[in-house]
Image (spheres, grey):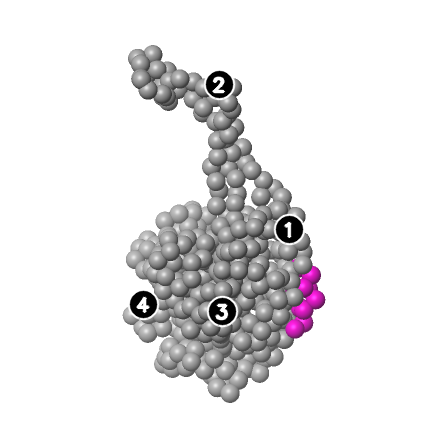
Amino acid sequence: MTEQEINGLVAKQRKYFQTGATLPVSTRITALRGLYDTISRYENEIHDALKKDLGKSGFESYMCETGLVLDEISYMLKHIRRFAREKRVRTPLAQFHSRSFKKPSPYGVTLIMSPWNYPFMLTLSPLADALAAGNTAVVKPSAYSPYTSEIIMKVLSQCFDPQYVAVVTGGRAENTCLLREHFDYIFFTGSQAVGKEVMRNAAEHLTPVTLELGGKSPCIVDQSANIRLAARRIVFGKYLNCGQTCVAPDYIYCHRSVKDALVKEIKQQIQIQYGREPLHNPDYGKIINEKHFDRILGLIEERKTVHGGNSDRKALRIEPTVLDNVTFSDPVMQEEIFGPVMPILVFDSLEEVIEKINAMPHPLALYFFTSDKAAAKEVTSRCGFGGGCVNDTIIHLATTEMGFGGFGESGMGAYHGKTGFDTFSHYKSIVDKKTWLDLPMRYQPYRKMHEKMVRFFLK
């Protein structure tokens, strides 16, 4: 799509939004129901596209992509009337007689830019929130997942007129054109480097943004943890989607006394969950492209590899790999891994863990396996991170009753459920003042009696 076409598209959406067509809750409900039905109808095609792009099985595609989107839409349909309602708040006595309320209002024309690792879910889930809040949307899926982008375009073009919801495909040129446009809100999921560029362009129009980024999310295992259960849940979270998950445990930070036992259990769990030959497991996915394949292989040090390490370039597959005796100065610890490589580091005290994590860029997620409630409270209170779990991994992002988002270098803003509706809404603060009474104390000329009255009301 050319720059002129993108400019025209945004202009059409702005004109449509300004008609007020998206404001009625009934319109939003109709839009969400249509989206739900169309996704359900094309579920098999969506899963086929995800298989082609990322090698995902049908089960994983539903569990981590289409199922989560349908759940988000269902949640919005169930609660949208309450979310969209004006909320009355207390009026100060000085403003007697008035009604004060907060009115949720859509921002207007929104831009949703999504990544390739969960290309369907990370596009359609924020879209559902944007539509529930009453916005129009321009959707820009990643060029790295072309088959999923194609089915997204097919689904959305059947549901919506482009003046309401439109899809722009393409690569860097289209991204650049879109970011030059004046949107009312930008929602971006992707890398920190591109996130900075999004924020830089948004600043030109003072456009508010949500940035869902990433980082090196730690997984702490202390000496009181249930090692067998920890290994099972860590292996699930780390190697899901071949490690190409923004909230995957990036590295394991393990107490020295239980490290050997944990490594042993992790090896066993890899075999249990992925088989003795993961490269031939039909349910094990693939790396998105050769560029990322080579980058991940470059992080694997043979002398520190204690499990896995083999790869298949033709299939773009890398075995679930474990690195032992890793330090924070090793190459694998200098960037977000975003692949099936698990470095294991050790610590001797919890204070050491807290100091180290807080000295690093704030991660998107943090996981802590422990049986010590006091230790869990200490870590979750003192460490800075977006969200996480105690004694599990990843599952916090699938809870619609909680917002999901980053913190510091891992992003800003959040979405999911009510938080997602709030993200795409501006809350207008309004006082409806009655006309039958008009207290004179605020008007000049000021008098001593008026000052006493003001002090009485405002103390």
The main secondary structure of the magenta stretch is helix
The answer to whether marks 2 and 1 mark residues whose Cβ atoms lie closer than 8 Å is: no
Q: Which one is closest to the eye, mark 4 or mark 3?
A: 3
The amino acid on which the numbered mark 4 sits, given as a three-letter code, is Phe
Return the x and y of residue 102 as percentages of the image width and height. Answer: 50, 37
Q: Is residue 31 visible?
A: yes
Mark closer to the chain start, 3 or 2: 3
- For label 1, count other residues whose C-alpha is less than 10 Å away and answer few (under 14), some (14-19) or many (20+): some
Return the x and y of residue 255 as percentages of the image width and height. Answer: 39, 61
Give how far apart the Cα atoms at labels 3 and 2 are. Answer: 54 Å
The answer to whether marks 3 and 1 mark residues whose Cβ atoms lie closer than 8 Å is: no
- For label 3, count other residues whose C-alpha is less than 10 Å away and answer few (under 14), some (14-19) or many (20+): few
- Where is mark 1, residue-wise? 27
- Where is mark 4, residue-wise? 328
- Where is mark 2, residue-wise? 437
Highlighted magenta segment, given as a residue range = 36-45
